[in-house]
């Protein structure tokens, strides 16, 4: 008789775990509390599914134990991930290191996984609400009990709750004795104190965003900054947001420095502005930055620099040009909060990784209980890294749960 593996959560990680556990010869049941499997997977990469990334920059994964992710990532690599999806019939395309299905449709990836699960005889039960897991690996649902030989908890985080990530997995883990690092939004927009954001809403511009916590520089990222009516968004903001969220939760002061011309050093920009003040002296004050930066930002920057917009460029004083240079290279904005979980792509926080074996994904507290994916205190940067974590951790959990059967 085949041993029974129960997987809780039919997201990317749970589905991957199911495939590989079944390939090990186990009888696998996946329990999903929403009406359909893979709902969050369908929204990844703006619906195009950024499956993985060919690059692995330093600091790509975060958490209280940032190195926890690497044994699984090394055990099931990017190359193996790509080969796995090719085996499922997915043609992949490389877009500057970002790997997508050639169809440009996340649904293609989900359907391929579901085809494989069907072929392997994996049972997926939807609208199945798990109420508790007993230490003897009995799963209690609203419809009764089911005993498993191994359980993989892949119930996701609290990010994007409309896709089913409601934090219920944390409750199940906590009741089994696992500690939960407080989940907070990550890869999320930041809300700012200043009033000028409404005037500049809609601007998209290349910028370097540097985060300071209690006056100390913590991290920075460069890319397309998006100005919203409440603050800042875009990839560079998402990349630093988890640090802002955790600092704010701890009551620390958080601000961002915005550099709107990161390609120009301070002295070169200052020289350029002095040259423009002579060349375009006949123009109204706004003209000193005409053609340099988005026109919506010009008004904001002049006001922040203390320049009267009613004067001509030639009347702008030297100290005001220096102030303008500073504002363009180092505009400070106070971060007051992040957007909520419904706007976050992932969470920082989750099941404490000190209580999980990084090689097998098995709980150090409950024999036969495994974790994978976002439920763990592991969050990656934008660009396919969180999906790679889902694949690697899910597959490793599936393999070891299957191989561990006696």
Image (spheres, grey):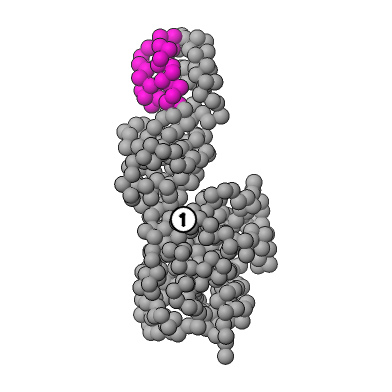
Report the magenta residues as a range.
299-328
> Does any portion of residue 14 appear in the rendered image?
no
- Name the foreground residue: 310 vs 276: 276
Q: Is residue 293 left or right of residue 196?
A: right
Which SS type dominates the magenta stretch? helix
Q: Is residue 340 above or below residue 323?
A: below
Q: What residue is disc 1 on?
A: 63
Instruction: Answer above or below: position of 289 versus 104.
Output: above
In the rendered view of the protein, which quadrant contains the C terminus?
bottom right
Q: Position of residue 13 (x, y in %)?
A: 53, 66
Q: Is residue 63 visible?
A: yes
Q: Give the x, y percent position of residue 241.
A: 43, 46
For the residue pair 355 and 392, the one nearer the viewer reads as 355
Closer-to-camera residue (110/363): 363
Circle 1 SS class: loop
Q: Residues within 10 Å of mark 1 (few under 14, many from 20)?
A: many
Q: What residue appears at the point 43 percent right and 52 percent down from the top-left corner?
A: 186
Magenta includes 311?
Answer: yes
**Residue plotted at (48% across, 68% down):** 356
Tell me what residue is drawn at x 46 percent, y 63 percent. 353
Q: Is residue 252 above or below residue 32?
A: above
Work out whether residue 268 or residue 165 is closer to the camera in this orientation and state it: 268
Instruction: Look at the image and tell me in which quarter the N terminus lies.
Output: bottom right
In the displayed orientation, state which residue is furthest to the bottom: 1
């Amino acid at each position: 008789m085949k041993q029974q593996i129960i997987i809780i959560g039919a997201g990317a990680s749970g589905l991957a775990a199911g495939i590989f556990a079944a390939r090990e010869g186990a009888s696998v049941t996946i329990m999903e509390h929403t009406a359909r499997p893979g709902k969050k997977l369908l929204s990844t990469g703006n619906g195009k599914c950024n499956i993985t990334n060919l690059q692995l920059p330093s600091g790509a994964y975060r958490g209280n134990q940032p190195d926890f992710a690497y044994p699984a990532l090394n055990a099931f690599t990017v190359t193996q991930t790509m080969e796995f999806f090719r085996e499922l019939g997915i043609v992949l395309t490389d877009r500057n290191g970002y790997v997508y299905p050639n169809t440009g449709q996340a649904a293609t990836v989900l359907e391929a996984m579901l085809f494989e699960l069907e072929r392997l005889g994996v049972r997926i039960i939807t609208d199945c609400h798990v109420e508790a897991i007993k230490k003897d690996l009995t799963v209690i649902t609203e419809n009764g009990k089911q005993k498993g030989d191994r359980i993989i908890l892949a119930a996701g985080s609290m990010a994007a709750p409309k896709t089913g990530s409601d934090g219920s997995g944390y409750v199940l883990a906590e009741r089994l004795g696992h500690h939960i690092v407080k989940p907070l939004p990550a890869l999320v927009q930041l809300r700012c104190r200043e009033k000028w954001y409404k005037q500049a809403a809609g601007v998209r511009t290349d910028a370097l965003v540097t985060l300071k916590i209690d006056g100390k520089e913590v991290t920075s990222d460069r890319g397309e900054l998006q100005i919203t009516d409440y603050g800042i968004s875009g990839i560079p903001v998402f990349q630093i947001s988890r640090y802002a969220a955790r600092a704010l939760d701890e009551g620390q002061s958080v601000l961002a420095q915005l550099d709107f011309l990161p390609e120009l050093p301070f002295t070169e920009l200052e020289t350029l502005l002095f040259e423009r003040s002579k060349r375009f002296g006949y123009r109204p004050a706004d003209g000193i930055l005409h053609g340099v930066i988005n026109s919506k930002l010009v008004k904001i920057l002049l006001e922040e620099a203390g320049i009267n917009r009613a004067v001509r460029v030639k009347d702008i004083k030297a100290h005001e040009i220096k102030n303008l240079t500073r504002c363009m290279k180092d505009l400070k904005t106070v971060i007051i909060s992040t957007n909520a979980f419904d706007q976050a792509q992932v969470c920082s926080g989750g099941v404490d990784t000190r209580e999980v074996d990084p090689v097998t994904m098995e709980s150090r507290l409950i024999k036969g209980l495994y974790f994978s994916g976002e439920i763990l205190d592991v969050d990656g940067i934008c660009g396919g890294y969180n999906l790679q974590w889902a694949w690697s951790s899910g597959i490793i959990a599936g393999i070891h749960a299957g191989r561990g059967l006696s």
